[in-house]
Image (spheres, coloured by chain):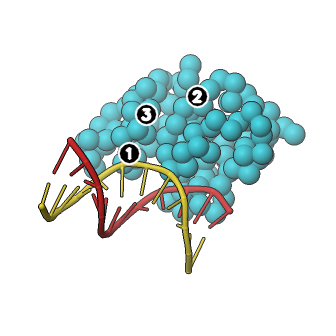
Chain colours: A cyan, B yellow, C red
Amino acid sequence: MNHWLLKTEPETYAWQQLGSTPEPWNGVRNYQARNFMQQMQVNDLAFVYHSGKERQIMGIARVVRTAYPDAEDTRFAVVDVVHERPLPQPVTLAALKAHPDLQDLLLIKQSRLSVMPISADAWQMILALTIS
DNA sequence: GCCAACGTTGGC
DNA sequence: GCCAACGTTGGC
């Protein structure tokens, strides 16, 4: 299983709106992000990150349908996700940037990318940050 | 509100 | 095919 991070502006679509009904993760208009989405498998888990004013990881989503064309623009793709579980505490971008072993995160190195893979190690380190 | 990063567009 | 101009994203 692979791990991912999905970025969203909470004013447009917020983590709190995601429930058990499959939600198309649409609106991605970047080929690098699309290519990552096309690698997602059913039951992969993804952090959901709020950009803008919040700048923190809110919770975890689960992929329930692999990539298919975005009806609004078939050059791009969407996957369907559902709510998996919230984080006990959101993990802020500042906390990620302060962690010496997380400096290779694409969230930090490539701030405009909206869909990205998260290594298994990084996934565990980020989860550990929610407990401390 | 500003600006860096970076993707896209269009003239050549 | 190159590159300048421009638009968008997103952190600060």
Residue at 49% of width from left, 45% of height from top? A113
Q: Position of residue A58 (x, y in %)?
A: 67, 47
Q: Tag 1: residue type? A: Asn
Q: Which residue is tagged 2?
A: A3
Q: Position of residue A59 (x, y in %)?
A: 66, 42
Residue at 58% of width from left, 28% of height from top? A3
Quarter of image, res A52:
bottom right
Label annotation for residue A30? 1
Label annotation for residue A37? 3
Q: Tag 2: residue type? A: His
Determine whether, in the image, residue A103 is placed left or right of residue A131: left
Element under disc 1: loop
Task: Give the CA separation, mark 2 to mark 3.
Answer: 11 Å
Subunit of mark 1?
A
Task: Give the CA separation, mark 1 to mark 3.
Answer: 11 Å
Subunit of mark 2?
A
